[in-house]
Amino acid sequence: MQIDQAKSSRSSKTVNLNTDLVVAGGGLAGVCCALTAARAGIKVVLIQDRPVLGGNASSEVRLWALGATSHMGNNNRWAREGGVIDELVVENMYRNPEGNALIFDTVLLEKVWQEENITLLLNTAVYATSKHSAGTISSVTAFCSQNSTTYEVTATLFCDATGDGIVGFQSGAAFRMGAEAADEFNEPFAPSKEYGELLGHSIYFMSKDIGKPVEFIPPKFALSDITKVPRYRNFSVKDQACWMWWIEYGGRLDTVHNTEEIKWELWKVVYGVWNYIKNSGKFPESGNLTLEWVGHIPGKRESRRFEGPYMLTQGDIVSQRQFDDAVSLGGWAIDIHPADGVFSEKPGCNQWHSKGVYQIPYRCLFSKNINNLFLAGRLISASHLAFGSTRVMMTCAHAAQAAGMAAALCIQNHWEPADLLVDARMETLQKELISAGQFIPNVSFGLEAPDFEINTSSQLILGKIPPDGPWHPLDLSMAQLLPLAPGPAPKFSVSVKAEKETILVVQLRSSIKSFNYAPEILLDELEIKLDQGEQDIELPFQASLEATCYVFLSFLQNSEVSIRCSRSRITGLVSVYHKQNKAVSNFGRQDPDPDIGFESFEFWTPARRPEGHNIALTISPPLDCFQASNLFNGYYRPFLQPNAWVASQDDVRPELSISWAQTKTIRKLVLSFDTDFDHPMETSIWGHPERIVPFVVREYEIRNDQDELVYHVEGNYQTRNEIRFESPVHSTALRFRFQQPGEGVPVAVFGIDIE
């Protein structure tokens, strides 16, 4: 037994750590920043004040992670974020198609736990920041409530991914809180004081049917007058968890220091809503439901935003401004909420979309006045309106990967964050990010003069999408997105079925910007007279294309007509519909008041699998855009064209060989496959009908010039396969043999990178 009779005060245990990079905050942004930096070879201490990782995506809050894909409700095709966040959501869908937030916790914890360059401190809150000088942080101090230990963590670089920005705030980094006036950044959508300057917090709940009647006695603090919640007339027992995102409060308060007060008000609302559902008599279907879970901490939307050398604005997003220092992308709508939240008579959100994805510049990812501080997550350098788009978690995570890679380059070269803007260093950062799977729209670094020869057993020449699928009624206008080269449009033919004689209108449309998927330009239109019954029709368009781009072969709504579809799933092809997705303010068209700074356009969006069949077509001349040279063009997803080598549809085990004139020493290979970048892969609650995307190659082998097996993979489901050989392979050739992933799904590979 130890007896300590010291009369003076005592100090808790202190542990001193020294590292290259401190990442404060373990939400998706902090996790992706830390993993990216650690995998690039530097030491990272990741400090998280909660018992799990994931922030708002964790089981503590249970908001699904989303980004540029916007529930497949906008015109951002193939826009799911790449790199580490892609790896995480693909892994989660494989393990967790049911959308269990607890399982997603384990996916994140496992990835961080496996990374030897990361020291993870859970349940540990940063509470003090020390500095070498006015512009340089030296260390942070954090306390773990579970082991009563204080951590003094010294580092060269720091990244604040805490949401509220505790490190940035304490270090003196310039920040803002609240909305800017419209004239500061020429943002005509800037909200009035009446609407509010901050977005609030939310708490969610979940119920469960236990098969017998359940009584609910509300706590005394539950909201007793449900009419204070204007939405009470629209409650549904089916809605739970983040479907009830509108249970929001706090936009009129200090969303940093009043969080506990906000939490209590949200608890009152949640238990008041449940009391109304259970005890008002208006929801008899709730009889067997029990309240299974209520969040214990609120999910925060907005608090501090920190200033970098550049602040992203509404105009940047709407115009899709191109930046020399682009390192990431966004695509969620500019989405702001009334400050009164759940108690407001106004709609719960006000979303306006841009026509396509936009770039996020590197200058938004580090502090303008603290020279060793990176910014990640919702606190990056953006106006309140731009924040309305950049704040969503997949966008936060993707940009944070850029901060993590930048930190690694800074450590390796003894630079500060701002030094990456000098000379060709930004190109180095962009190349490293793309090599790690990051997608930066309109930025690629292809091989201009390869030192090798490529041969394949086959290549898809797309002259026919076979008519082996269902008939699809044209209750909505439907289009096939097709990648076309400059020059005259091909001639098409399709099979249709008419209930009676009618006229079918068919259009060929394209976008004003070749990299967008908003069918704004009418290239040509045909009116086809149909007889009753099944028939093949020719579509002899007279249009011509000026640049490589995707076009919409559009069949306008006609409820008397059905069109034949195909079971084939082909990389770089997708069908879309002129339909609504009200959850993301897609009402078929966007027609804003011209004074608020947004554009008018139509929405044409895909259907989720197992729906969403391609239209059966014949194409003359056939499309020749699936060459093996695409493997080295610097894009790893469809963008302007498919950017993939795709084998012939009847080549079940296609082969590809890469050969050199002299022996090559190969230490690392990276193969990039198609996991359908249109799929949002919501991380929780939503659920998905499949664990593995149909397009992805699941089995392949690699052989050397002596036909010896050097690598074999079975059961792949990931986008990016990184292969590091224990002993380098010395060979004049590599031969890849792939197994077709499924009937009607030809092998497709976006890239093969060799080091």
Image: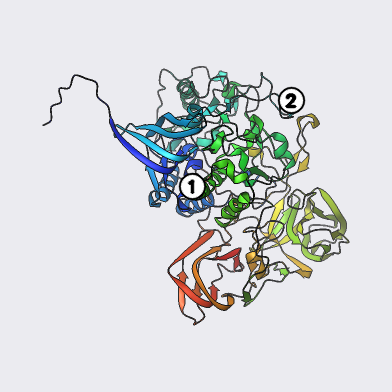
Residue 391: x %, y % from top left: 58, 36
Asked whether 434 or 68 is in front, the reply is 434
Residue at the far bottom: name it: 706
Side (left or right) of 668 relative to 331: left
Reply above or below: 347 against 554. Answer: above
Tell me which residue sits at (52%, 80%) in the image.
705
Residue at the far left: name it: 1
Which quadrant of the structure image shows residue 178? top right
Asked whether 660 or 611 is in front, the reply is 660
Asked whether 123 or 107 is in front, the reply is 123
Mark 2 burial class by Cα count in 10 Å: few <14, some 14-19, many 20+ = few
Tell me which residue sits at (38%, 37%) in the image.
153
Mark 2: secondary structure: loop
Residue 612 visible in the snapshot: yes
Total numbered circles: 2
Residue 690: x %, y % from top left: 52, 55
Which of pointers 1 and 2 lies earlier in the amino acid sequence?
Answer: 2
Residue 205 visible in the snapshot: no
Tell me which residue sits at (76%, 68%) in the image.
618
Mark 1: secondary structure: helix
Side (left or right) of 15 relative to 321: left
Side (left or right) of 382 relative to 96: right
Side (left or right) of 29 relative to 144: right
Amino acid of disc 1: Ile
Of marks 1 and 2, the one in the foreground:
1
Amino acid of disc 2: Asp
Which quadrant of the structure image shows residue 632? bottom right
Which quadrant of the structure image shows residue 482? bottom right
Q: Name the residue under label 2.
A: 183
Residue 90, numbered label: none
Residue 450: x %, y % from top left: 64, 70
Q: Mark 1 points at which residue?
A: 411
